[in-house]
Image (cartoon, helix red, strand yellow):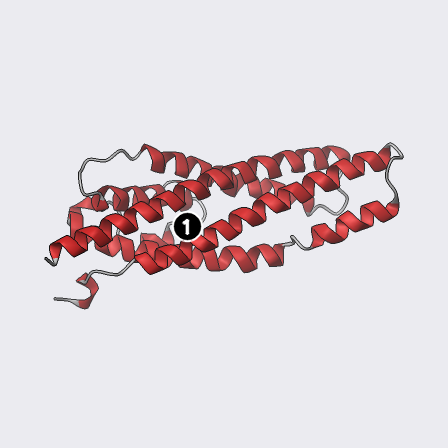
């Protein structure tokens, strides 16, 4: 049998991916909490209820949640999730047949690029989900909710980055930024919880079906 057609173990990669996804989720929640803290303190400063020392303290704390820290967490998480999905995609084709997958394997990686990431990740993940299930058909609705949450956190997050990176943000910019931060974090948590469930279920299904096939 061609080596590309052999079953790929996914359980270990699934655990690693899950841990990293949780780390990114926690980071986003803490970053948004810090944004709210900074915004409320800024409002207090305008009202004369906070000092420059208070503002400097919260700014120093907020610096910890900069772009470099986010990339240091999100990049490994994205890579490991993609490796897990690549292996799960190969297994799904073996379990459901080539016709069960709408997209070629290359889209496991290419589907995350801008514009393509609006719908291709949904197709790839939902097809893997469907083909991996021991009893089909299985509802793809949960993957649809994940896809909507993923797109929201992705594009709202870009709006947030644009506002906070402005040289001289206005008070209105700060209000919109905190709203964007909150929306993006809620969407991130929703997407994260769902993808954790998907990773667990798909890994379990594929592992069990592989074990049954070898008996």
The answer, for residue 32, to whether it is visible in the render is: yes
Work out which residue is located at the far left of the displayed protein and give it: 215
Q: Position of residue 204 (x, y in %)?
A: 27, 50
Q: Nearer the viewer, residue 67 or 64?
A: 64
Classify 10 Å Cα crowding around label 1: few (below 14), some (14-19), many (20 and above). Answer: some
Residue at horizontal 40 percent and vertical 38 percent from the top:
146
| 109 horizontally vs 58: left or right | left
Work out which residue is located at the far front of the displayed protein and give it: 215
Residue at horizontal 43 percent and vertical 35 percent from the top:
148
Residue at horizontal 18 percent and vertical 63 percent from the top:
6
Report which quarter residue 118 is drawn in: top left
Q: Position of residue 132 (x, y in %)?
A: 22, 46
Q: Quadrant of the N terminus?
A: bottom left
| 77 horizontally vs 95: left or right | right
Q: Position of residue 206 (x, y in %)?
A: 23, 51
Q: Nearer the viewer, residue 147 or 22?
A: 22
Q: Quadrant of the C terminus?
A: bottom left
Q: Nearer the viewer, residue 172 or 38?
A: 38
Q: Position of residue 109 (x, y in %)?
A: 37, 55
Report which quarter residue 170 is drawn in: top right
The answer, for residue 98, to whether it is visible in the render is: no
**Element type at marker 1?**
loop
Residue under label 1, please give it: 112
Where 66 sits versus 44, above or below?
below
The number of callouts visible is: 1
């Amino acid at each position: 049998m061609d080596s590309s057609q052999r079953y790929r173990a996914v359980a270990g990669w699934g655990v690693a991916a899950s841990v990293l996804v949780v780390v990114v989720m926690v980071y986003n929640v803490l970053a948004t909490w810090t944004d709210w803290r900074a915004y409320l303190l800024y409002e207090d400063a305008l009202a004369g209820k906070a000092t420059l020392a208070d503002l400097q303290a919260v700014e120093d704390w907020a610096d910890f949640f900069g772009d470099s820290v986010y990339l240091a967490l999100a990049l490994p998480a994205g890579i490991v999730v993609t490796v897990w999905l690549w292996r799960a995609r190969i297994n799904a084709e073996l379990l459901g047949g080539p016709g069960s997958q709408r997209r070629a394997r290359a889209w496991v990686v290419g589907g995350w690029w801008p514009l393509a990431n609006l719908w291709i990740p949904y197709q790839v993940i939902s097809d893997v989900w469907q083909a991996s299930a021991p009893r089909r058909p299985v509802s793809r609705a949960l993957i649809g909710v994940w896809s909507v949450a993923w797109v929201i956190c992705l594009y709202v997050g870009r709006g947030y980055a644009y506002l906070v990176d402005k040289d001289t943000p206005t008070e209105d910019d700060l209000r919109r930024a905190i709203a964007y931060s909150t929306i993006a974090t809620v969407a991130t948590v929703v997407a994260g919880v769902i993808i954790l469930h998907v990773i667990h279920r798909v890994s379990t299904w594929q592992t069990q079906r592989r074990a049954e096939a070898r008996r």
